[in-house]
Image (cartoon, rainbow, N blue to C red):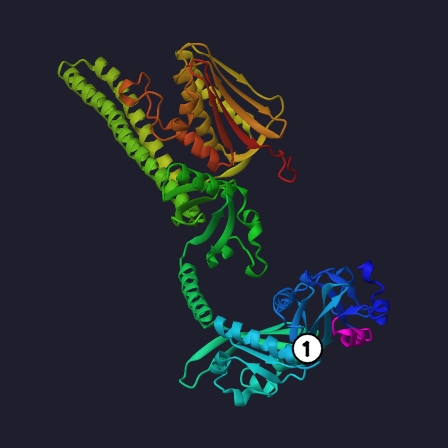
Amino acid sequence: MNNLNNIMDSLVNARIDGDNTEDVLQSSSHNNFLIVDDEGIIQYKSEKFSLCPGEGKLNSINELNSDPSLTLVLQGMKLNKTKTLSIELIVYLVNNSQVKDCTVRINKITLFNKQLFLLLFEENKEYKVFENKINTFQSALEKANIPVLIADDNYRTKYVTQNFEKVVEKNIEELYDKEIFDVFDKYLNAGDEANLLNALDSKSVWTKVINIQHQEGTKSYFDLKVTPIFDSALEKWNFIFSVYDITDYIVKGRSLAKEESKLRGIINNISDTLFVLKKKDNKFSFAIGNNNFFNYFQIDKRSFDPDKFKSYVGTSIWNTVLRSIDYIENKNLRSTVFNHHDKNDNYYEFSLSLVKHAFDEERYYIIIFRDITAKYKYKKQLEIAYQKEKDLNKLKTLILHNMSHELRTPANAIMGYSEIIEDSIQTKDYETVNQISHYLKDVLAKLIDLFTNIIELSDVETGNYHLEIVRLNCNQVVQSVYNKMLETAEKKKINFLLSLNERGLFIKTDWIKFEKVLIALVDNAIKFTKEGKVELLTKLSTTNEVEIKVIDTGEGMEESKIKNMLEPFQQEEEFYTRSKEGSGLGLTIAQKLTAVLGGKLNIESKKNHGTIATITFPAVSPKPTVEL
């Protein structure tokens, strides 16, 4: 190009071959012209050439994106005898986002015996660019079956596709050059029109779903979209109104919403707590839950955050659900049922079901659970009651056997003694009659004592008793019991000891019933002690309670059987293996009477190591006005 920088000087000096001198000379005053060789390489361009931005980098017309192609035009002129040619040219600029429409006059010239081309560019200021766009749009849009309306910067309709006419059920005569607000007046309310006007004025994209009631009574739904487009050639804005038929989506969406509403209604009518988890890419997320789910866990639906699902149900339930999901996955099961017991002593029954699609990686786990705490505890109560009933039946059997034994033994003795007395009277052996009569009195006394104990136990259990509570020195009662039981202990050659607290120990109780309790405990201790000692003592504890202890070195009993020994007619040995006399009511009456009197009875024992029976009463002052 530098070799031609002085081209104008050469032209003045008439160094031009051919008859093109006038054209070339006239081009010197032209703003936009180029001189290129037959390969399209630019040899010269005018100082004010401004066809496109960045023309300083333009070295060849082959770099221009134009319709038609300048390269092909020049190749055609090179091959034929055409010396001049004038064409309308569209040049696409800036990545095809802008266009320029111009007329190009091409002259074939010879300079320095070399064939060159002079290109004179004249930019059109008419509406042809917009029309070409419209034609291009029309062809594309009609083929794509997209309803489109194009409005100018005055918001008036300038182009409408045929399918747009069908959508609004108006022909081109009714639409052309009409304000777009008149076109859409049936489908937009005042608020919509204000928003549309604001979008047009601000050259912003705007969308709106509109529904159109057709003449035949059907209704269609369309997505109306407004897109502003700037025409750089005319330096004006145009607005493309496109509508997309979304009727199927709306209808399907409403149908799905209706089905979802029905499903939710069904779920909410399930009385149990229900929720659904979705698993995808080994991650769990909350899908849905019924009203009972939100109510049970006290969750506000308005502020519910699915990502915090674990915190709502608690770690304990969440871990149980995860373990159950792992279980059915590992076992390739569809469902399972499991129970859960939390730290608050609540019991739950869970039902877990898996729903999955053969071609979908998503898995849904339906969890239904119910609080069975009341049911579980009621079941446990029934089991306890059943076991208690079994124990009572066993106890009833033992009582009947005991009663039979306890009544039959004295009855047999009475029968035998009666026969001896009868025989002795016949033989006039009055000494034997006298002796047997004493034995007979002993048997009757034991029988009366048995009946007395049974009546006493019955009165205590039914509450049919009368107490005479007095303030007394328990040492006096203990001394009285010791005196009464000393002879019995001496007959068995047992060392019977008494240890009384130095000071008087006062309690509130019924003297007679309190003494009966002590006699029962001492009698029991003497009965089950073959050798050794039985000790009766009183003391004041550090907690200001009076303790009366009966300690023996007898046979003792298994710790596991102490509770049973407090039941009526119970002894460590069954009735048919007993080696000791007794009805088995002594400890029962002692325990129940102590409770009635306001005291506590505690028994400690170990097999072959003796027994300690401790009665505890609150200590009181000797004087009624002052309590300890």
Q: Which residue is mark 1?
A: 237
Tally of numbered tags: 1
Q: Judge from the rendering whether residue 40 lies leftward or rightward of residue 614; answer left or right.
A: right
Q: Judge from the rendering whether residue 267 lies leftward or rightward of residue 294; answer left or right.
A: left
Residue neighbourhood size for the residue with mark 1, other residues' Cα within 10 Å, grouped as few (<14), some (14–19), many (≥20)? some
Q: Report which quarter residue 28 is drawn in.
A: bottom right
Question: Residue 311: image x %, image y %?
Answer: 57, 47
Question: Residue 599: image x %, image y %?
Answer: 51, 33
| Nearer to me, 462 or 103 | 103
Q: Judge from the rendering whether residue 430 lies leftward or rightward of residue 110; answer left or right.
A: left
Question: Residue 364: image x %, image y %?
Answer: 44, 50
The residue depicted at 51 percent of the width and 38 percent of the height is 469
219 within the magenta span: no
Residue 189 can be seen in this image? no
Q: Seen from this angle, which residue lies furthest left?
A: 426
The amino acid type of the residue labelled 1 equals Trp
The residue depicted at 47 percent of the width and 50 percent of the height is 277
23 within the magenta span: yes
Quarter in which the N terminus is drawn: bottom right
| Nearer to me, 174 or 580 | 174
The residue depicted at 41 percent of the width and 46 percent of the height is 350
Quarter in which the C terminus is drawn: top right
> Magenta stretch?
18-30
Is residue 447 placed above or below 255 in the rendered structure? above
Q: Judge from the rendering whether residue 538 lies leftward or rightward of residue 24; answer left or right.
A: left
Is residue 521 placed above or below 471 in the rendered structure? above
Residue 382 can be seen in this image? yes
| Nearer to me, 27 or 435 | 27
Question: Residue 349: image x %, image y %?
Answer: 41, 45
Is residue 315 placed above or below 105 in the rendered structure? above
- Secondary element under disc 1, as helix, strand or loop, is strand
Q: Seen from this angle, which residue lies furthest bottom?
A: 173
